[in-house]
């Protein structure tokens, strides 16, 4: 069994408590990860602060060159990274490759940092006076990330932070720790100086030490809503800049004029891909008017046909859940909804172990008050709700506390426009089920899906990892130097 260690100042570091890391397809431990204590957090922040002192002075073109090299290495090692992701997370290999490609696109954005970081300049704002503004890095930035995208979500953060001139300490999810070690190796091979990128493994204790450490200037967090709320409150109270992305309950609204075959295909992939363990997964369908019955038939047919198995098998379309607890929680939600009167149209409970499998579940006639609708299930469970009108559907979506992603399926541009303007959700798809913004836009939800002001990656990521400085200059001619400054503001 492998022992997965921290990466501090360019070297592997062990010590302290350990936790088993499971292979979800086998339902058995496959390795162990060390859990950082205050001492390892201290060592990582110190190494990062030391590295920051010189890294912030490195020219923009050299920083960009490191990112270009890192981007190529990510491509060359895509297979190796995908295998690490599938081994610990369970998702199918093609899906693991997909997350690496999406993450690499953020590195491609970071390669353009000299262009993105250009400041503003105003000539002659007053007689002989010029003004300009530019952005400077913050120092040591920390990232705390969830289990469901072991490569992509950290890549939303550290390439931009580092290209902007910061140093970074990453705390990966303790359930999927291995990929981050390989990422550290690839940065080193790309020429990034030791200490600019550090990895401290651990759990909530490690995370809390990191988000309250006086040497950390900014915290990026992605995970569940209760933890996002805690991280935002704790780290802002400790004086840090914070962006904390939380959980989701993403609704897809299907109007009767939609192409129902296309909608059913797209919604099936968005609901059950990665066993529903995506923050942008569709977990609720709101079928409007006459769309409902034919849509449920089509969704059921597709859900029943999904091949469930180990992520390493090329025939598999959906892998296991992350843990035994997750399997019990997901099945428990379906049990409780059924007891409360929901109709289990497709039942994925009861798949044989020892892997952490739950098959696709489709629930109809779900009461709005049931936990299955009120809470984020984060598993392969799709709930169908019915509405009479688009306005009723919009009201349902807006009544939900989450506001991460949503989609509408329709052939009416007017209805789509009405929807995209009215919903209180950060990312909207029109006939696109998983509307994740490209790397050159920014990713983030509204309401309980985001605590903080800035979204991640793209232009908002650059703003998050830098702060603005405005300079006003006067370079008078020798002869004009004499004469006292006016006491009043110039008019
Ligand atoms: P989680 O909240 O349990 O854990 C996230 C991270 O926080 C992990 O690194 C974990 O070690 C740490 N952590 C856990 N409890 C903590 C505590 N009390 N204090 C400090 N740190 C703590 O989330 P998860 O189960 O790993 O991931 C799934 C969740 O992440 C889902 O809710 C999903 O919607 C969400 N998610 C959101 C987005 C988004 O962009 N909004 C993206 C991916 C995942």
Image (cartoon, helix red, strand yellow):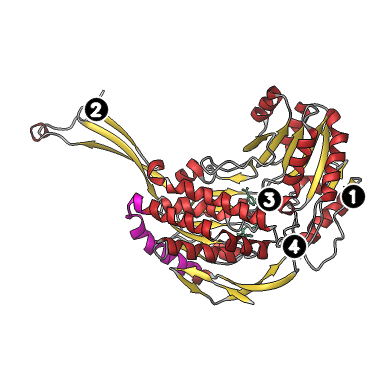
Count residues near mark 3 (Cα–Cα under 10 Å), then give few for <14, some for 14-19, many for 20+. Answer: many
Gap in angstroms between the C-alphas marked 1 and 4 = 28 Å
Q: Which corner quadrant holds the C terminus?
A: top left
* Figure quadrant of residue 285: top right
Q: Kindly indicate whether the residue at mark 4 contacts the one at mark 2 (C-beta within 8 angstroms).
A: no
Q: Ligand 1 within 8 A of label 3's CB?
A: yes
The residue indicated by pointer 4 is: 310
Residue 80 on image: x %, y %: 58, 63
Residue 41 on image: x %, y %: 50, 67
Residue 30 on image: x %, y %: 68, 72
Tell which circle, 2 or 4, labels the residue nearer the N-terminal end: 2
Is 56 one of the magenta-colored residues?
yes
Q: Secondary structure at mark 3?
A: loop
Disc 2 versus disc 4: nearer the observer? 4
Disc assigned to residue 338: 1
The chief SS type of the magenta part is helix
Vertical side of 47 occupied by 281: above or below: above
Count residues near mark 2 (Cα–Cα under 10 Å), then give few for <14, some for 14-19, many for 20+. Answer: few
Is 51 one of the magenta-colored residues?
yes
The residue indicated by pointer 2 is: 126
Vertical side of 425 occupied by 388: above or below: above
Q: Secondary structure at mark 2?
A: strand
Q: Quadrant of ligand 1?
A: bottom right
Residue at left offset 52%, top offset 46%: 457
Residue 343 visible, this angle = yes
Would you say 425 lies left or right of 320 here? left
Count residues near mark 4 (Cα–Cα under 10 Å), then give few for <14, some for 14-19, many for 20+. Answer: many
Q: Which residues are magenta?
A: 41-62
Residue 487 on image: x %, y %: 21, 30
């Amino acid at each position: 069994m492998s022992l997965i260690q921290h990466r501090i100042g360019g070297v592997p570091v062990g010590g302290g408590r350990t936790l088993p890391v499971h292979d979800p397809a086998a339902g058995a431990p496959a390795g162990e990860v060390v859990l950082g204590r205050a001492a390892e957090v201290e060592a990582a922040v110190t190494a990062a602060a030391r590295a920051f002192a010189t890294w912030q002075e490195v020219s923009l073109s050299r920083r960009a060159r490191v990112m270009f090299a890192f981007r190529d290495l990510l491509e060359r090692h895509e297979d190796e990274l995908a295998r690490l992701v599938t081994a610990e997370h369970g998702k199918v290999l093609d899906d693991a490759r997909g997350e690496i490609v999406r993450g690499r696109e953020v590195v491609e954005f970071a390669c353009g940092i000299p262009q993105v970081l250009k400041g503003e300049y105003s000539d002659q704002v007053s007689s002989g006076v010029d003004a300009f503004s530019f952005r400077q890095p913050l120092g040591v930035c920390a990232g705390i990330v969830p289990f469901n995208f072991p490569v992509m979500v950290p890549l939303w953060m550290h390439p931009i932070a580092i290209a902007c001139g910061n140093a970074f300490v990453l705390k990966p999810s303790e359930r999927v720790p291995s990929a981050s070690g390989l990422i550290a190796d690839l940065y080193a091979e790309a020429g990034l100086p030791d200490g600019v990128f550090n990895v401290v493994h651990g759990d909530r204790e490690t995370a809390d030490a990191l988000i309250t450490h006086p040497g950390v200037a900014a915290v990026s967090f992605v995970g569940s809503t209760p933890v996002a709320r805690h991280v935002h409150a704790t780290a802002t109270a400790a004086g840090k800049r914070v962006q904390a992305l939380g959980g989701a309950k993403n609704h897809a609204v299907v109007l009767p004029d939609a192409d129902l075959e296309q909608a059913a295909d797209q919604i099936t992939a968005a609901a059950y891909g990665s066993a529903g363990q995506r923050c942008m997964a569709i977990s609720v369908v709101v079928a409007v008017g006459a769309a409902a019955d034919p849509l449920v038939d089509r969704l059921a047919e597709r859900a029943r046909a999904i091949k469930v198995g180990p992520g390493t098998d090329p025939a598999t379309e959906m892998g296991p859940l992350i843990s035994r607890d997750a399997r019990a929680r997901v099945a428990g939600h379906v049990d409780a909804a059924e007891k409360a009167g929901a109709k289990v149209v497709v039942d994925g409970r009861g798949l044989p172990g020892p892997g952490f499998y739950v098959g696709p579940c489709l629930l109809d006639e779900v009461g709005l008050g049931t936990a299955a609708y009120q809470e984020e299930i984060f598993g392969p469970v799709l709930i169908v709700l019915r509405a009479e009108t688009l306005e009723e559907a919009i009201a349902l979506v807006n009544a939900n506390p989450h506001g991460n992603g949503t989609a509408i399926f329709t052939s009416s541009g007017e209805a789509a426009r009405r929807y995209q303007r009215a919903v209180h959700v950060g990312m909207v798809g029109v006939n696109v089920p998983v509307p994740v913004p490209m790397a050159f836009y920014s990713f983030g939800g509204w309401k309980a899906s985001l605590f903080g002001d800035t979204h991640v990656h793209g232009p908002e990521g650059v703003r998050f990892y830098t702060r603005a400085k405005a300079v006003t200059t006067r370079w008078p001619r020798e002869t004009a130097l004499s004469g006292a400054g006016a006491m009043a503001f110039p008019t």
